[in-house]
């Protein structure tokens, strides 16, 4: 885990964007060039 904010809730926004944020976090390493997400 890198870039961990001191706040307990890095993504306070709740709603449909929540899923998008989670997906974005999961795809972060893939964007680095490790491997294709799909």
Image (cartoon, rainbow, N blue to C red):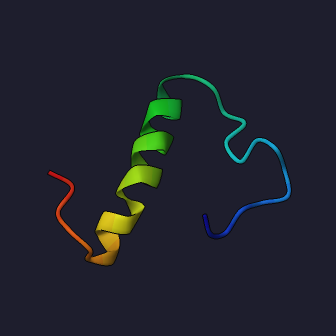
Instruction: Quadrant for the N terminus, please.
Output: bottom right
Toward the bottom, the furthest residue is 33
Q: Is residue 8 left or right of residue 18?
A: right
At 41% across and 51% down in the image, what residue appears?
Answer: 26
Toward the front, the furthest residue is 1
Q: Is 18 placed above or below 25 here?
A: above
Q: Is residue 8 left or right of residue 21?
A: right
Of 3 and 15, nearer the camera is: 3
At 76% across and 41% down in the image, what residue appears?
Answer: 9
Q: Is residue 12 left or right of residue 19?
A: right
At 21% across and 55% down in the image, what residue appears?
Answer: 37
Q: Is 1 placed above or below 11 here?
A: below
Please state the horizontal and vertical placement of residue 28, each as a whole percent of the image: 41, 62
Please state the horizontal and vertical placement of residue 5, each as a whole percent of the image: 77, 60
Please state the horizontal and vertical placement of residue 19, each as a whole percent of the image: 45, 32
At 43% across and 38% down in the image, what residue appears?
Answer: 20
The quadrant where residue 36 appears: bottom left
Q: How many marks?
A: 0
Q: Is 20 placed above or below 2 here?
A: above
Q: Is residue 26 left or right of residue 2?
A: left
Toward the right, the furthest residue is 6
Toward the top, the furthest residue is 15
């Amino acid at each position: 885990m890198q870039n961990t904010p001191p706040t307990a809730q890095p993504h306070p926004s709740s709603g449909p964007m929540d899923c998008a944020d989670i997906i974005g976090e999961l795809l972060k390493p893939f964007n680095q060039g490790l491997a294709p997400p799909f």
